[in-house]
Image (cartoon, helix red, strand yellow):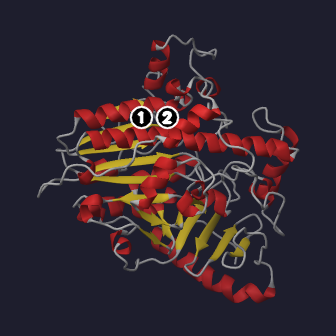
């Protein structure tokens, strides 16, 4: 485990994100799509956090178009990542809860691109079925998670292990579980060069180096800063650098009952050995979470350095985002699965050097549903996005407007709910309506920490009516069959 001093020395010397060789006319662009799991937007300086030690991603943001208000399509893993990879809503592709496999006939970005000249790879967490097996147009497959073997499809080898498992075995580690696998708790307690981010960085650097002639497409998904909230940089940040959220003890009036039950459960039982009845317990979790973000930052630095060394940085689209956020004590909650900003809002950076795109911040809300159309557009295959519900963000990157200025999100709790839908407006309102629970309305311009639920106030009726109208139009347009109360 690195000491705090050693980690700070590394951060201070993190490689700059430089420009590579000139792009030749007719070159097909590469795509480096980097994403994390459970990372809030406000972990980066460009989103208001100048405390977390994130030198590489902060530098990348300074060279990127930054989408200030990007939202996931559903604030939980499998549904959110299904949209990122396919450009379809969870209710359309069927991945409405965790551990549902993406259908074989549902196309991901490389399948939509339909360009056999591209070398393609997926590395890291997948969480869309058959975790350790190459699929959906990705030729090279570097798997990382062994915990989803119970969800393998019929006919798959249930004893198959991940690429990371074989790496740990090669390092001489003995599996810590009765099934002969390494648990997540075991992995996060290794020295930093044997943890998952460093492992993925090495694999990505190798891929980029071997395919420098291009074109190539690489999706790399880190588990961190997802739970378990533990890692080699637990003590990198002090209490003042990773504070408990200021709305920690604020519970809005008539909050959904499901949220209340979740809060009570963690208060009574804690989380993975952390007692959460005291502020000290929450403080420890926040420091650990910040350390995991820094661990990802370090790995991204190694990947971007490899990109620069390959001479292809000038011809490579670099995207950074996360599948969803993390409450980390906001409103006394942990995890995701709620329509609060901390769980819904994610970072989104796009660096497209060959377009000579100057750094700027897009303030209007956007959705992950637009990622696939945007990337197809940037890669010269915009026509392949026909039939998808999202729209390319390239126009917004150039200062234009988006065809849909409201952003939508959904929640499913099979088999009998409560299910919900949310809409975020460009003028700062957020409405979340459940079929079998309380609803929420926030004016984020006046109440950015979402402390006052305005849904049940008479003076809010017109705003609710307006946002419900937009929500119903979206539901009809996308084939969403959920029946919401009037």
The x and y percentages for residue 414 are 65, 51
The x and y percentages for residue 341 are 65, 63
Which residue occupies 59% across, 54% down? 43
Residue that mark 2 sits on: 197
Residue that mark 1 sits on: 201
Relative vertical location of residue 235 with respect to residue 80 in this rendering, above or below: above
Which residue occupies the foreground of this view, 333 or 286? 286
Q: Secondary structure at mark 2?
A: helix
Relative vertical location of residue 136 with respect to residue 251 in this rendering, above or below: above
Which residue occupies 69% across, 71% down? 448
Q: Locate residue 316 relative to residue 254 in the image: left or right.
A: left
Q: How crowded is the residue under tag 2: few (<14 C-alpha within 10 Å), some, or many (20+)? A: many
Q: Secondary structure at mark 1?
A: helix
Count of numbered tags: 2
State whether residue 73 appears in this view: no
Which residue occupies the foreground of this view, 64 or 142? 64
The x and y percentages for residue 470 are 55, 80
């Amino acid at each position: 485990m690195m000491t705090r001093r050693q980690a700070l020395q590394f951060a201070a010397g993190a490689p700059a994100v430089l420009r590579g060789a000139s792009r030749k006319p007719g070159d097909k662009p590469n795509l480096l799509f980097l994403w994390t799991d459970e990372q809030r937007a406000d972990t980066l300086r460009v989103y208001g956090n100048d405390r977390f030690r994130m030198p590489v991603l902060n530098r990348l943001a300074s060279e990127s178009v930054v989408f200030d208000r990007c939202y996931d399509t559903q604030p939980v893993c499998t549904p959110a990542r299904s949209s990122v990879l396919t450009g379809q809503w969870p209710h359309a592709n069927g991945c409405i809860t965790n551990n549902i496999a993406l259908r074989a006939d549902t196309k991901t970005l490389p399948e939509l691109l339909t360009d056999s000249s591209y070398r393609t790879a997926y590395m890291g967490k997948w969480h869309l079925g058959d975790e350790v097996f190459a699929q959906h147009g990705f030729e090279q497959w570097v798997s990382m998670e062994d915990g989803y073997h119970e969800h393998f499809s019929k006919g798959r080898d249930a004893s198959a292990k991940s690429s990371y498992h074989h790496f740990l075995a090669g390092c001489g580690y003995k599996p810590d579980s009765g099934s002969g696998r390494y648990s997540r708790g075991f992995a996060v307690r290794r020295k930093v060069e044997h943890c998952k981010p460093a492992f993925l960085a090495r694999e990505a650097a190798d891929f980029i180096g071997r395919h420098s002639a291009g074109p190539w497409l690489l999706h790399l998904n880190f588990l961190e800063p997802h739970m378990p909230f533990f890692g080699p940089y637990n003590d990198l940040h002090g209490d003042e650098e990773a504070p408990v959220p200021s709305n920690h003890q604020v519970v809005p009036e008539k909050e959904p009952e499901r949220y209340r039950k979740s809060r009570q459960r963690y208060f009574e039982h804690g989380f993975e050995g952390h007692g959460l009845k005291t502020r000290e317990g929450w403080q420890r979790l926040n420091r650990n979470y910040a350390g995991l973000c820094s661990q990802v930052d370090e790995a991204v630095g190694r990947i971007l350095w490899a990109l620069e060394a390959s001479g292809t940085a000038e011809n490579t689209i670099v995207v950074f985002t996360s599948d969803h956020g993390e409450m980390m004590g906001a409103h006394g909650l942990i995890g995701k699965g709620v329509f609060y900003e901390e769980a819904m809002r994610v970072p989104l950076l796009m660096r497209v050097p060959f377009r000579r795109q100057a750094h700027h911040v897009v303030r209007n809300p956007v959705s992950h549903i637009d990622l696939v159309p945007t990337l197809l557009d940037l890669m010269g295959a915009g026509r392949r996005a026909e039939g998808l519900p999202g729209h390319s963000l390239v126009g917004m990157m150039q200062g234009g407007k988006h065809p849909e200025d409201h952003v939508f999100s959904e929640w499913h709790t099979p088999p009998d709910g409560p299910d919900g839908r949310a809409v975020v407006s460009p003028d700062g309102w957020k409405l979340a309506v459940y079929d079998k629970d309380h609803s929420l309305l926030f004016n984020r311009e006046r109440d950015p920490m979402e402390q006052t639920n305005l849904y049940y106030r008479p003076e809010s009726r017109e705003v609710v009516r307006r946002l419900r109208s937009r929500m119903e139009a979206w539901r009809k347009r996308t084939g969403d069959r959920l029946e919401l109360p009037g």
